[in-house]
Amino acid sequence: MKFDVSLHKDFLLVAMLPLLFIAVRLYDISLFDGLQVQYIETFQAVWLLFCSVFTLVYMRPSLLSRPQLLFWVWAALWWFLLFGRSISWGRDYFPDEPRWIFRLLSILWISPVFIMLFFRDLRDEIKSKLSGVAFPITYFSLALVCFLISDTIEHKRVMAIFFLNDPAYQDLVEELYEVPFMFALLLTALYFMKIDRQRSAEPCITHGGGLPIPPNTSAKNAG
């Protein structure tokens, strides 16, 4: 596996968010007083749903090969799964409904992601991306760090004292660190999306039989 360690502007912008939250912790700035957890959770849900739709629209499915199409539908389903998890499978909006309904909804939300792995074309495409494309380690590392910080705060681990100075803000700060996690996760996906979109847009030369020939193939071979 190859790695891309480039530091792009969008990475730096997203990385400023957790640094801002840490600065608030160190200098005890009253930045969080006017915020409410519900507003942040609603933003997260809308963002995840947007990412699911954006993935399909941006990738222009009609121009993709079958393996690419399966991969990006699978990616969109992952975003949709995260959206479902963020709203507790609907329990946040319908808290009085029976629990079995939400268990059933969770199964319906989760199962497509794993069922699609039975497609060999999808598995081959995943392997191809992991082995043939430089992995954006900077974006992914940022997402991973923000997720681990959020998890540390949620479960009150030992390291939580470095990110939280007032237990009253635990839920709020936990949700705040999930925001750059979601941004960085989209940047990680967008890295691969741009590569596949560019490949799908490359013109192909066809010979008499109608089979496509890559653009870098010489005219002599095309003949």
Image (cartoon, grey):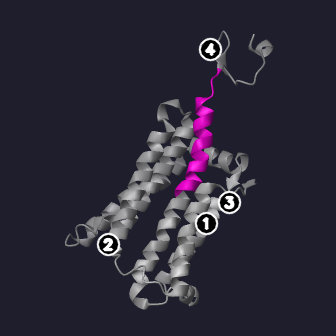
Q: Amino acid type of disc 3? A: Ile
Most foreground residue, 79 or 40? 40
What's the distance in space between the residues labelled 2 and 4, CA to CA? 56 Å
Most foreground residue, 96 or 10? 10
Image quadrant of residue 104?
bottom left
How far across and down, in percent of the image, does residue 11 sit?
61, 59
Q: Which mark is residue 38?
A: 2
Q: Which mark is residue 142?
A: 1
Going from the N terminus, do you reach mark 4 or mark 1 first?
A: 1
Q: Which residues are magenta?
A: 186-204
Identify the residue at image location x=57%, y=44%: 193
Callout in the foreground (2, 4): 2
Q: For mark 4, does the 10 Å Cα neighbourhood hold few (<14), some (14 to 19), or many (20 or more) residues?
A: few
- Where disc 2 sits, the SS reads helix
Above or below, comparing residue 219 to residue 92 in the picture: above
Going from the N terminus, do you reach mark 3 or mark 2 first?
A: 2
- Which residue does the numbered mark 4 point to in the structure image? 210
Q: Amino acid type of disc 1? A: Leu
- Which residue does the numbered mark 3 point to in the structure image? 137
Contact check, label 3 and label 2, Cβ < 8 Å: no
Residue 39 at least partly seen: yes
Going from the N terminus, do you reach mark 2 or mark 4 first?
A: 2
* Magenta stretch: dominant secondary structure: helix
Going from the N terminus, do you reach mark 2 or mark 1 first?
A: 2
Q: Amino acid type of disc 4? A: Gly
Going from the N terminus, do you reach mark 1 or mark 3 first?
A: 3
Image quadrant of residue 210?
top right
Identify the residue at image location x=40%, y=80%: 171
Above or below, comparing residue 39 to residue 113 in the picture: below
